[in-house]
Structure formats: structure tokens, C-alpha cells
Image (cartoon, rainbow, N blue to C red):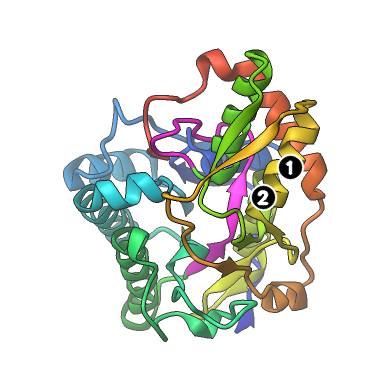
Amino acid sequence: MRSAEYSLAGKRIWVAGHRGLVGSALVRALEREDCTTLTVGRSEVDLRERSQVDRWMRENRPHAIFLAAAKVGGILANDSRPAEFLYENLQIQNNVIDSARKHEVEKLVFLGSSCIYPRMAEQPIKEESLLTGPLEPTNQWYAIAKIAGIKMCQAYRRQYGCDYISVMPTNLYGPNDNFDLQGSHVVPALIRKVHAAKESNAESFELWGTGSPLRDLLYVDDAADGMIFLLKKYSGDEIVNLGSAAEITIVGLAEKIAEVAGYKGRIRFDRSKPDGTPRKIVDVSRLAAMGWEAKVPLEEGLRRAYDWYVQNYANARLDRASGA
């Protein structure tokens, strides 16, 4: 691991996947920097099509890239549409990473995910745990694609000298999340369920599984701040975990969301649904040693996320499970 100062002053920074949860947070965060933020929608450039990516890169010449575009989703989406999650993520990664080399992009930050670590990795999960054991079966297709992206960045650094780094964010939540119950992660799914129960005066809301799994949750604006920190301060082969260094059970999370929403009903467990990984919290000591830590407490982050949903749910992205 080594430090490398990278100045954003006067640079053109492309946020690939700017409409998604992470991408939109990066756009907000980059507004505070002395740089120009570049974005492009899917109607103009389909990142799965190499010729379109090359054309856009040639015309816009970004100095640095945050590769936040991906097909993402929760347990059900990953388990029921494995071919899409594998193929589309590989296409997006391959096209953007290789085109970045071709067009001499100075730096690239690739977003991995803590869900690609081995299912039974020792906790808290250290970066060295990658590829040391079997993956979580319900999201292995997505995980294989993301692992390939990490290895591609490492290979391009080794063979071509490209300054490409990989970040491993934990479970993220916040504004612009995906609230589709068929494809969402746990926080937006629970926010939608709790709000619906509150609005209909229902006696209870449903929670998948036993509620016992433990998760590390990070507010997405904190995540964006950490990614920009790494863009500026870090250059190396090693992946870097990005998390809050705190954990909570799924049932505890559900109770906190109900409290934030002012909902007084009970939780109804559907134990026919899978729990997923029993415990997942990332070791953030590598990032902490560089001088960064999360700032938004969980309850405050959940309140912000819930308020955003209430104010925007009519226009929320309820019909797709893609961050691209």
C-alpha cells in the first residue's frame, strides 16, 4: 500500500453510473471540489457497447473515472437473474476499464462490494479474505463479475502501469436508492415496507428470514466522501474496504426504521425466505490508517433516507434494479 497525491483541480471527472445510489452521491460530493463532473445517460451511451464507450471517451477525455455503473440488486434479483448479473457487469467493466487505458485516463476507481467476500469469511472481513473461500450462493454471479473487475484493475496496473484502484464498500443506503421490492437491498426494502404499513395502519410488516444476520451499514454520502479521499490519497494493488466500523442485526435495523418512521406495529417474520450471509462487517483499519472515518451515525442516516423516500417515493426508481 502506498500514498499518492492526486489533485482534482481543473480535472474532468467522469462518474459512470451517475443516476444510481453511489453515482448520485459522488456527483453531490464532487460539487465541493475544484473539478468538472462528467456524466452521460444510458440513452446516449450504453456501457455494454464498446463502440459507444470509446466514442464518448474520445469526445470527452476524462482525466479520472469513478466506475460506479453496475447492475445491482438484492437477494431475490441476484438469485433469479444470474445471467444478467454476470454478463452485464462483465461487459460494463471490460468496456470502461480497457477504454480508459486506450484513452490514457490518469486514474480510475473501481467499486467492488463487500458481498463478494467468502460467505463464511472471518469477521470483521479483512481485504486479504478475498478468494479464500466459497461465495454466498445467492449472489455468486454478481460476485464473480466484481472479482473479475478487481483483477482487471490489478492486471492493468501490472502490465500497463495504469493507476487503477479498487474500493470495497459495505452495505450502502441513502437518497436515490432502489426501492423496488423485487430488486432492492435491505434498507430501502424495509423503508418501503414500514412506510406502507404506517400509511395503511397495518398491524405488522414483513421481514424476510430470521432477522438474525448482522450487517455493517454506511450512509452513501459518507461512502462518496471516502471514495474521493481514496482517489486523492491512494495508489496501489491492494483493495481497500470502506465501511462504518459498526454493525446491527437485520431485526434491529427494522426496529430502528420503524422508530424513525413513527410506526408502532409489529414485525412479521417470513422464515421461508433466505437470510443471506450470517454476518458481514468489513475491517476498515487499512482506510482508518490513511486518516478517514465515517461521519454520519446510523440513526441520522436512516432518518435522512426515510425522509428522502417520503418526499420522493412517487418518483423513486421502483421499476429497475440497475445503478447504471
- The image quadrant where one finds the N terminus is bottom right
> Residue 281 at x, y = what percent?
63, 68
| Towards the viewer: 141 or 26 | 141
Which mark, residue 251? 2
Identify which residue, 289 or 71, lies in the foreground: 71
Residue 32 visible within the image: no
| Residue on which disc 1 sits | 255
Viewer-proximal residue among 44 and 121: 121
Q: Nearer the viewer, residue 52 or 246?
A: 246
- Residue 163 in the image: above or below residue 56: below
- From this view, report whether residue 274 is shown above or below residue 207: below
What kind of element bears circle 1?
helix
Which quadrant of the figure has residue 97? bottom left
Residue 178 on the magenta span: yes
Which segment is the magenta one? 165-184
Residue 177's tag is none
Q: Position of residue 125 (x, y in %)?
A: 59, 77
Q: Amino acid at mark 2?
A: Val
Pointer 1 local density, CA inside 10 Å: few below 14, some 14–19, many at least 20: some
In the image, what residue occupies the spot 54% across and 39% down? 21
In the rendered structure, the answer to whether residue 84 lies left or right of residue 218 reads left
